[in-house]
Every structure is written in C-alpha cells, then in structure tokens.
Image (spheres, rainbow, N blue to C red):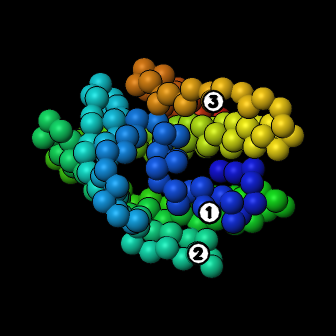
Amino acid sequence: FNVGIPISDAWHLLTDIESIVPCMPGAELTEIVDETTFHGNVSVRLGPVSLKFSGTARFEEIDEQNYCAKVHAKGSDEKGRGGATADIIFQLESREQKTFVVIETDLALSGSVAQYGRGAGMINELASQLVGQFSTSLHNKITEENAMASNKSDGSEVPKKLDSIKPISGVSLMLKVGIAILTRFFRKIFKRQHSM
C-alpha cells in the first residue's frame, strides 16, 4: 500500500508501534516491554468464530538505512483454542514524495484455530481486508496530523482531534471476506464454462 509522506517520515511512523497500533483493526497494545518488544491483543473473526489472541511482538531486525524491518509475533487464543506465530517483513520504497510499503507475512496457526481458517482462502482474504483497513486508517491519521500541523504553523485555531478509527467490525469484515471468496469462486466457474 502507499503512504502519502516521504520515506524517512513513513519509516519513523511505521516503527512507532504506540502510534500505529490504533490504526490496525482489532489490535490493542497492552505493554511496552522495551524499544523492540511489545505485548498486546488482536481480536479477529474466522468464519463463525470470534478469536482474541494475547501475545508478544518483537522487532528482530531494524535496518534504518534500507528501510526494512523484521518482526516476530506469537500469541495464543484466550479460550485455549490454539495459537498463531508470524514472521513479518516490511520494506519501504520511495516513490515521488510518497512511500510504497510491502509487507510479507509467514503465518502459522495451530490447534482448532487452524481449522477455522482453512477452506476457501479465508486467511488470505482476511489479511487483505485487514491491510486495506490499516492503510486507510493510516492515511486518515497522516491527513489529520498534517492538517493540525498546518493550522498550528499559520496561527489559526487547532481543531479538536478526531476520534481514532474504530476497529473494523466482525460482521463488516466477514461480509467483505465472504464477498471476495464468492466472487473468486464464480469467476472460476465462469472461466471453466467458457473454456469448454
């Protein structure tokens, strides 16, 4: 996804966990252990099941010169239905005063949680929707902060801070995921019929 600020600004923003967690649907920061380690919760819905993972995320590598970072995250469902581990690499690329962010995730689910997310590409569609919501929230945050900075510099009254973006609702997210899966399914059928 694209971030409408120069790469150095985008890097500082995206590595400021406390600042960006409110932009991630369903995420909550509960403790800052040190500069690279954080405890938190992530609430998500897989099919008919609502899950809440509690766990830890840690920056394993931070390459400021190349604007690249690697994060390892692990957590377990609060009701004991399984767990998740993820290795996430994000790389920033400069594109004409904007920044293009590439995120690569290696996700492993265990326990009954793994079964909920299996069929019909549910995990990929869910991830796509979450990243889309995150980038929209991040864009809104940047726009809001730029407007506030602009108002401060010209001496005009600073507007009240807007309410932070609320996490995407389970119903809304699952509706989008379901539509994406059905669309892909019918496209395959349509292609098959026309190729016969």
Q: Nearer the viewer, residue 13 or 1?
A: 13
* Local crowd size for mark 1, using a 10 Å CA cut-off: few (<14), some (14–19), many (≥20): some
Q: Nearer the viewer, residue 62 or 188?
A: 62
Q: Which residue is mark 1?
A: 11
* Local crowd size for mark 3, using a 10 Å CA cut-off: few (<14), some (14–19), many (≥20): few
Q: Which residue is mark 3?
A: 161
Tell me which corner region of the image, top left, top right, bottom left or bottom right, holds residue 7. bottom right
What type is the residue that disc 2 sits on?
A: Glu
Residue 138 left/right relative to 15: right
Q: Where is 182 relative to 82, above or below?
A: above
Q: Which residue is mark 2?
A: 64
Secondary structure type for disc 2: loop
Residue at coordinates 50% horizontally, 28% vertically from top-left?
Answer: 166
Image coords of residue 91 (percent x, y): 59, 66
Image coords of residue 170 (percent x, y): 40, 25
**Separation of marks 3 and 2 at Cα, in angstroms:** 30 Å
Res 195 seen here: no
What type is the residue that disc 3 sits on?
A: Lys
Residue at coordinates 35% horizontally, 64% vertically from top-left?
Answer: 34
Image coords of residue 14 (percent x, y): 56, 56
Q: Which of labels 1 and 3 is toward the front?
A: 3
* Local crowd size for mark 2, using a 10 Å CA cut-off: few (<14), some (14–19), many (≥20): few
Residue at coordinates 62% horizontally, 79% vertically from top-left?
Answer: 65
Which residue, as the protein is rendered here, is positioned at the far top? Answer: 171
What type is the residue that disc 1 sits on?
A: Trp
